[in-house]
Every structure is written in C-alpha cells, then in structure tokens.
C-alpha cells in the first residue's frame, strides 16, 4: 500500500505537477517536531510489529525532504512565537514576539497576503486557537501571552476558518484587566462558533467559522482520547477533524483557491514532559491530518502544494534502541503523564489515607508495566521509593496543591524510567537541532535545498504568488 502511495506521487509529479502555481496551499507545522520525533514514531511503528527499522508515516514519503535551521533574532534556540513569525512572514524576530520584527513593527504574513489576493484562509491547531504558532499567522503583538489581543486581531483579520482545542483568556486582557467577553465579538463579526458535530450539521449556512471542542475546552492528548478517558474523549478534537472541516469549508464557493496553516501543537507539549509514548501518538495524529491534505492533492495534483515543517525541536530527544523490543516497551503506556498524574491523585483523594508503596507499585505496574514487562533494578526502585517517601507518603501534611505536585513527581520519574528502558533519552526543552521539511505538489521543487524557517516562508510566498 505504501509502495502504491509513493509510486502514485512519482507518477503525478512526472505528469508535470511541479510546473504550476499552486491554487491550494497546505502548510503543516509540527510544533517541537524535530527529525528525531519523526524517527521515534516510525521506529516505534516497526518495533511493535517485532522488527527493526521503520514503518513510514505518510508525509515522510513525499518526494521532497530536506532540513532547516530556525535560530531567532535573539537566540540560537527559538521559541514558538519567533519561529512562527519567521515561518509565517519570512522575518526573524526576538523570542516571544509575534508577527512583529525585532523593533516591534508589524510584518505582513502569508495568510494576510493570501486573503488580500482573494483566497480563502484557514488557521487550525491542536492547541488554543490564539496560541503562539497560529498567532504568528493571525496577529501582531509584542508578547505571545497577549491572548485576548491576539483574539481581537483574529476578528480584525476576518479569516474564513479558525479552529483549535480552546481559546485562551476570553475575558481578560494582557494586563489581567477584565474585558468584554470575546465570543460575542467573534459572533458580531459573522463567525459561527461550533464544535465538529455542529459544524457537520450546519456548515453550508455558516459565513465564517471558529471551531472549538465544546464546553470542556480541555486540551487533551491524542493518547488519552484514543484510549478513551471519557472526560478527554468528549472534549477532544482530532487534528484530522480540524483539517477535514477546514478543507470542507474553504472549498465552499471557492474560486481563487485557499491557504491553510495547520499546526500539530501537542507534539511540543509531550516533548516538554519528556513523554515518548504521548509524543508518538501526537505525531501519528499530525500525520493523519496530513493524509487529508494528501487525498486532496490526489484530486488536484497540479494545483496543490503541501509543505510540512516544524518550528523547532523540543526535548533534545536522543534515540538509541538496539533491539526490536526496546521501543515496543512504550506500548504499555496508555495515558499521558498528565492523565496518569490525575488518576493517581484521584486514588489518593478517594482513599483518604496514605497510599502504601505496594499500592504505588501496583499502579505503576498496571499503567507503565514497571516490575512486569519492564525491568526495574534495585537502584531504580530505590530512586522511585525515595520519591515516594519524600512525597506521597507525606500526603497528610501537604495541601492539595502540593499533593498534585507530589504525585506528578513519582509519575514523571516512572515515565522517565520507562523511556530509559525503551532507550529514549531527553535532555531539556527547546533545542537547535535541525527541523525537517517535506513537500509535494505544485512548486515543491523549490524546497529541495537545505533551508531556514524564514526562507521557507519566502519560498512559499514566491511559489504561490503571494505579495
Ligand atoms: Zn514551538
């Protein structure tokens, strides 16, 4: 099947697809998705089949693949705001700045250019719709934390489709001052605020869309939704749903084409937590959204460009599995570190008493396979036991807030141990490791050389004819 997919791509390209100016542009950004996050996911997929090597994702089979640098104007290690700005507008800026140059002047981005050229524009993300990466295409603010102001910029832009897993600071300005609720302002500007189900039922009559998951507004990880933690599944919007809905809506009465930026944001968050199993599921979720674009490309090969990259690498992820069984150990983990922490917290609250070390061992055994599928030697057990003695065992003296931090500590150490047994290692947060670039379709041949985040933006603008 994979071979068919690749040979089809080659066939379509050989038909002259690259020579055209793309009418439809898909720009996928995997937040924190360095080359090793992809490698981890593909090797894991082979490992659970009991073999060495990789089981490729869809987007890694695209005919163009290269690497990019992403240093910002203030650091060799960028944040999402500065790299987002470079990826959106082709201008390097300082970390924390969003849609402005290092002096604070607004910079014109490709979504605004596409809109000015009469194209439909969509911006979707698996995190908050006004978070840094989407914000780089939506707003011009001196601080990425100005969520309320970013929402106001979203309304002023009037893009056709916004979608995310939440909307931050709906009633409070950057200075924490109470402000008029933002949702009625979206509605007054012609937006229908809906979840995917409501969208399905009524999209034909909608003028503009702000898609949010519903009451919960809880940003959940794919691993938790896939494994059906009820409260997470109910509020979860998959990346695929966001991309599918955006494409459906952008194609309505479409004459001049569209620009869609779609961010897989939770890859970054999982990597900040040094949680490999959760990261893998996020990369798979991202790939499933890209498959929607690939299906679209197969329908309009001469008119579609798909570019995939990342804003930076997160976690300084290092991989050294030797045997097919190494990465497969991660299979036992069915919930993110966050959810495991709340599960443990719930047990502690329900018990109204100190959980014994044996009970903690049972929990970590059931959830992470420790002492079962995953070997725990005495040094590791001592490490976990010391954390237990210093935190969980002292539960009665701690406040609820401390309690949360405490159970998070033992869960995080246990997930760390599982990662180590899978031969996956983490060092810190954002790194300067190269980011990957993949492309297919009209104009993809302009992305064949080693590049840079700002250069990718300038190349997309040139290829798509955005000014
Ligand atoms: Zn980022």
Image (cartoon, grey):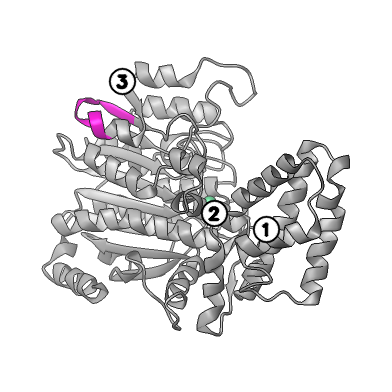
Task: State the image coordinates of residue 174 (x, y, percent, origin top left).
Answer: 61, 26
For residue 386, the mark is none
What residue would you read off at disc 1?
363
Residue 55 lies within the magenta run: no
For the residues bearing labels 1 and 2, Cβ distance under 8 angstroms:
no
Residue situated in front as seen by the camera: 402 or 462: 402
Task: State the image coordinates of residue 35 (x, y, percent, origin top left).
Answer: 48, 68
Of mark 1 and mark 3, the one earlier in the sequence is: 3
| Residue 278 visible, this angle | yes
Q: Is residue 313 left or right of residue 7?
A: right
Q: Is mark 2 within 8 Å of ligand 1?
A: yes
Q: Is mark 1 within 8 Å of ligand 1?
A: no
Distance Cα–Cα, label 1 vs label 2:
27 Å
Q: Which residues are magenta?
A: 200-209
| Residue 70 visible, this angle | no
What residue would you read off at disc 3?
190
Q: Quick one: quadrant of the N terminus?
A: bottom left
Indicate whether 375 appears above or below 336.
below
Residue situated in front as seen by the camera: 439 or 224: 224
What residue would you read off at disc 2?
268
């Amino acid at each position: 099947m994979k071979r068919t997919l690749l040979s089809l791509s080659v066939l379509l390209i050989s038909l002259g697809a690259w020579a055209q100016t793309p009418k439809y542009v898909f720009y996928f950004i995997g937040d924190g998705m360095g080359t090793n996050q992809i490698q981890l996911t593909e090797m894991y997929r082979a490992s659970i089949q009991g073999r060495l090597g990789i089981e490729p994702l869809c987007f890694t089979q695209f005919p163009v693949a290269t690497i990019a640098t992403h240093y910002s104007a203030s650091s060799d290690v960028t944040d999402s705001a500065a790299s987002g700005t470079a990826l959106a507008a082709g201008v390097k800026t300082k970390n924390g700045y969003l849609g402005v140059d290092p002096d604070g002047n607004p910079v014109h981005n490709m979504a605004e250019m596409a809109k000015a050229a009469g194209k439909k524009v969509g911006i979707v993300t698996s995190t908050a719709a006004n978070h840094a990466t989407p914000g780089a295409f939506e707003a011009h603010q001196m601080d990425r934390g100005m969520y309320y102001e970013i929402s106001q910029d979203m309304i002023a832009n009037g893009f056709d489709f916004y979608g995310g897993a939440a909307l931050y600071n709906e009633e409070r300005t950057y200075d924490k001052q109470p402000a008029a609720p933002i949702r009625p302002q979206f509605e007054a500007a012609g937006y229908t605020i809906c979840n995917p189900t409501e969208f399905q039922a009524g999209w034909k009559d909608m003028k503009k869309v702000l898609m949010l998951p519903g009451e919960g507004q809880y940003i959940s990880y794919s691993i938790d939704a896939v494994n059906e933690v009820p409260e997470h599944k109910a509020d979860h919007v998959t990346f695929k749903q966001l991309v599918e809905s955006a494409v459906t809506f952008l194609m309505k009465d479409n004459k001049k084409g569209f620009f869609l930026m779609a961010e897989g944001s939770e890859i970054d968050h999982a990597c900040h937590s040094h949680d490999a199993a959760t990261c893998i599921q996020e990369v798979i979720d991202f790939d499933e959204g890209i498959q929607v674009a690939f299906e679209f490309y197969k329908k309009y090969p001469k008119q579609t460009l798909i570019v995939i990259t990342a804003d930076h690498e997160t976690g300084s992820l290092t991989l050294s599995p030797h045997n097919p069984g190494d990465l497969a150990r991660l299979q036992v983990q069915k919930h993110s570190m966050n959810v495991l922490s709340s599960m443990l917290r719930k047990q502690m609250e329900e018990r109204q008493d100190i959980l014994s070390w044996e009970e903690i061992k049972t929990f970590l055994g059931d959830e992470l396979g420790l002492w079962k599928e995953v070997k725990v030697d005495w040094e590791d057990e001592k490490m976990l036991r010391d954390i237990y003695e210093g935190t969980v065992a002292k539960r009665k003296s701690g406040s609820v807030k401390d309690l949360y931090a405490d159970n998070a500590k033992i869960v995080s150490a246990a997930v760390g141990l599982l990662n180590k047994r899978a031969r996956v290692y983490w060092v810190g947060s954002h790194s300067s490791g190269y980011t990957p670039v993949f492309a297919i379709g009209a104009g993809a041949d302009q992305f064949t050389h080693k590049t840079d985040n700002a250069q990718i933006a300038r190349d997309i603008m040139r290829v798509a004819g955005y000014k």
